[in-house]
Amino acid sequence: MNFKDIQQAYFLGIGGIGMSAIARYFHSIGIVVNGYDKTETPLTKELVAEGIHIHYKDLGSRIGDLGLTKESCLVVLTPAIPKDHQEWKWLVDKNFTILKRSQVLGIITDVYQTIGVAGTHGKTTTSTLIAHILKQSNVDCAAFLGGISSNYQTNLLLNQSTNQPINQYMVVEADEFDRSFLTLHPSIAIITSTDADHLDIYGEHNELKKSFLAYASQCKENGSLILKKGLDITADVTRDFITYSVTEKADAYASNIQIKGDEYSFDLLFKEQHINNLVLGIPGLHNVENAVAASVACLLAGVTADELKAGLASFKGVKRRFEYIIKRNDFVYIDDYAHHPEELRAIISSVKNMYPNKKIVAAFQPHLFSRTRDFVDGFAESLSLLDNVVLLDIYPARELPMEGVTSNIIFDKMTSTNKILCSKTEAVELIKQQKPEVLLTLGAGDIDQLVGVLKEAYK
């Protein structure tokens, strides 16, 4: 498909982080963009301010009033749209060309040197860090990001180079949900983790691992595959690959890791290279691990050691990924998207190491009934690392309720000495009663709606 033949693009679910990046890309190349989403958010408001037309009610057949024509309009669909959506039905009946977001991303990236970052966790920060390092170097890149970069305040970066796309780098987050990443054929492919997740899609962990193996096999023949050391798929990978680690020796690993307050520094050893005193602009040992993977990809892409140092030090992170909302001597507030037991374990462990003598209070909102059911023991174990937990009701997202699956099943298994179960409307007052010195809000649902209220309460 040649996007030069498209004059209009219509997005069903335009407010999603991946969908909005593609919408911005089409808008940047002169295509008229319209879209539907269920609710207005700060991100959809930004899109409207940029000149993209969005509505929030299913128009059904009245979508024809927007002037869309099947000859010149591409419809982009997110898997989150329900099957009974009336606009979708009308567009199908009228024979519009309809592609999934992942298919469109695959078409766009096929003409670039793509760097794809996959993994059940770690991929958003790693891909955004790669994009930042490349943008701050002489290599440059474009990027479709799975979060809002704090350096650039957007999830879309455009390449400033006049070279043909085949000679330009494109950084993408390779999403395993719905097997979306199997539309990609990266020149550099990274897999950060293959922990069980999305079992509502895959059924069992082994099927998820097969999908990651398929993604690894799609790395171009003369490209580079980068795997976290110890992944449970490595024995089945049939091509050469580079391993990385933060705690043990690998093809690339960090050594001499030091923590000063919330600043991490380390040395990078990658084959014959030894780059000393790298300082990471964001905290967390798990982010040092992400930085090792990102550094390998950037060095392979042609970034120099000095450019790597500068890029790592100036990286400000991703919105809702270990994001400092308030940072004072007497009070710290961090917001994070963590919604998997291993993500929770990583951020809680890092915060406890950074603030060992502070009273840490975490509010967590489980995401999806199926994920809560599948990983109840893991959630309980990770949250029990904290002494003070405020546990919110499950955010259902695309799912209907499941009998017997509520936040209570996590709550009952937690060993924390101070735990509270509440609704989102009760959370702010109950958090304040805990008198935190360090506050965490965690989850991928709508717990972020509390951030502004809590920021105001503690400013």
Image (cartoon, rainbow, N blue to C red):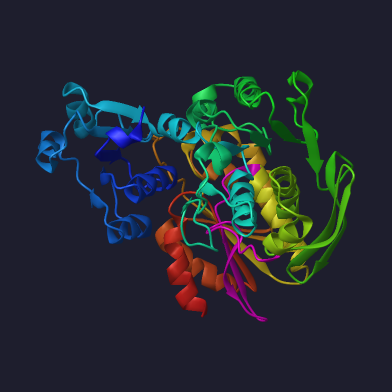
Q: Quadrant of the N terminus?
A: top left
Side of 251 where 177 appears, left or right: left
Task: Look at 80% across and 33% down and name the residue there.
Answer: 230
Q: Which residues are magenta?
A: 313-341
> What is the number of callouts on the image?
0
Residue 408 screen position, x and y as percent? 53, 44
| Residue 109 visible (yes or no) | yes
Report the front residue among 19 and 4.
Answer: 4
Residue 142 screen position, x and y as percent? 52, 48
Residue 444 screen position, x and y as percent? 50, 49
Residue 54 screen position, x and y as percent? 24, 50
Height in image: 129 above or below 458?
above
| Residue 415 visible (yes or no) | no
**Residue 421 inside the magenta-drawn segment:** no
Side of 137 where 295 appears, left or right: right
Height in image: 244 above or below 70?
below
**Residue 330 inside the magenta-drawn segment:** yes
Task: Look at 61% across and 21% down and name the residue there.
Answer: 214
Height in image: 5 above or below 211?
below
Height in image: 118 above or below 263?
above
Report the front residue among 173 and 419.
Answer: 173
Task: Look at 57% across and 37% down and name the residue there.
Answer: 114
Task: Look at 79% across and 21% down and name the residue there.
Answer: 235
Residue 284, quarter of the rendered image: bottom right
Residue 350, quarter of the rendered image: bottom right
Report the front residue among 434 and 146.
Answer: 146
